[in-house]
Image: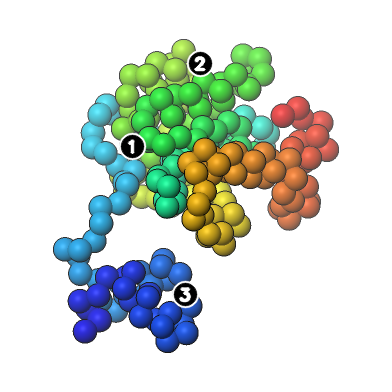
Amino acid sequence: MYNEMGYRRMRAALHRRQVCISEKVVQRLMKQECLVDAANRKRRYGSYLGEISPAAENVINRDFRAGTPNEKWLTDITEFQIPAGKVYLSPMIDCFDGLVVSWTIGTSPDADLVNTMLDAAIETVPGCNNRPIIHSDRRAHYRWPGWLSRMHNAKLTRSMSRKGCSPDNAACEGFFGRLKTELFYPRNWQGTTIEQFIEVIDSYIRWYNEKRIKISLGSFSPLEYRENLGFTA
């Protein structure tokens, strides 16, 4: 019986029995018990879109520690599905303190989304001696001419995860996880427009940088931590 049900129908059946768990948990449990029909799975937005240009070396190599700002930056794209449609977030994260250096939010995971974000990040780098390593996965956006020319002109060092290896960018994935756990999953987005949702995500990131305390930073927010150490954001 159950191996013929999709995860949404399975979750609905469980709710009828007063068992309230999220779709993600249902999907995971069904997968563990081999109850998911592979033929019925929807294609997910993937990070690897094929070979575009040669991949850069994995310079970061899972070492996400940084002694000062602008040493190591991480970037990726995450997708949000709300009733009104899909929204994509492209941030640049500083390994030093988790500050979101720059970000773009849009309805298409295209080159413009990541290139605009990179342009804004480059503008924040003070002087000419601070040249961050920028680590990403291997998706096409980070291997197209627009991205490569920006990296070259700004004298930035590229670093890339291994093919299909998400732990190689775990620190950026951690930010996405916190954002979705704290903001996205607990709320019902029915009736929220794309424009309203984008504003909510933007406000969260500003709050994350300015107000959200991190125990690892001595209970300061990223911006407070920098100010306390005498760094300018």
Residue located beneath label 3 in the image: 21
Observer-nearest of 103 and 85: 85
Query: Residue 174, position in %: x, y?
Result: 53, 52
Residue with the most extreme front position: 191
Q: Quadrant of the C terminus?
A: top right
The quarter holding residue 226 reads top right
Side (left or right) of 102 relative to 216: left
Q: Quadrant of the N terminus?
A: bottom left
Query: Residue 59, position in %: x, y?
Result: 45, 36
Residue with the most extreme left position: 39
Depicted 133 relative to depicted 76: above or below: above
Q: Residue at 34% across / 43% down in the picture?
A: 47
Q: Residue at 58% across / 31% down in the picture?
A: 102
Query: Residue 55, position in %: x, y?
Result: 31, 32
Label for residue 154? 2
Name which residue type carries label 3: Ile
N-terminal of the pair, mark 3 or mark 2, is: 3
Label 1 residue SS: loop
Name which residue type carries label 2: Ala
For label 1, count other residues whose C-alpha is less than 10 Å away and answer few (under 14), some (14-19) or many (20+): many
Side (left or right) of 35 relative to 190: left
Depicted 204 relative to depicted 19: above or below: above
Residue 171 visible, this orientation: no
The quarter holding residue 139 reads top left
Mark 1 to mark 3 CA distance (whole Å): 32 Å
Q: Residue at 67% across / 45% down in the picture?
A: 208
The quarter holding residue 57 reads top left
Between circles 1 and 3, the one closer to the viewer is: 3
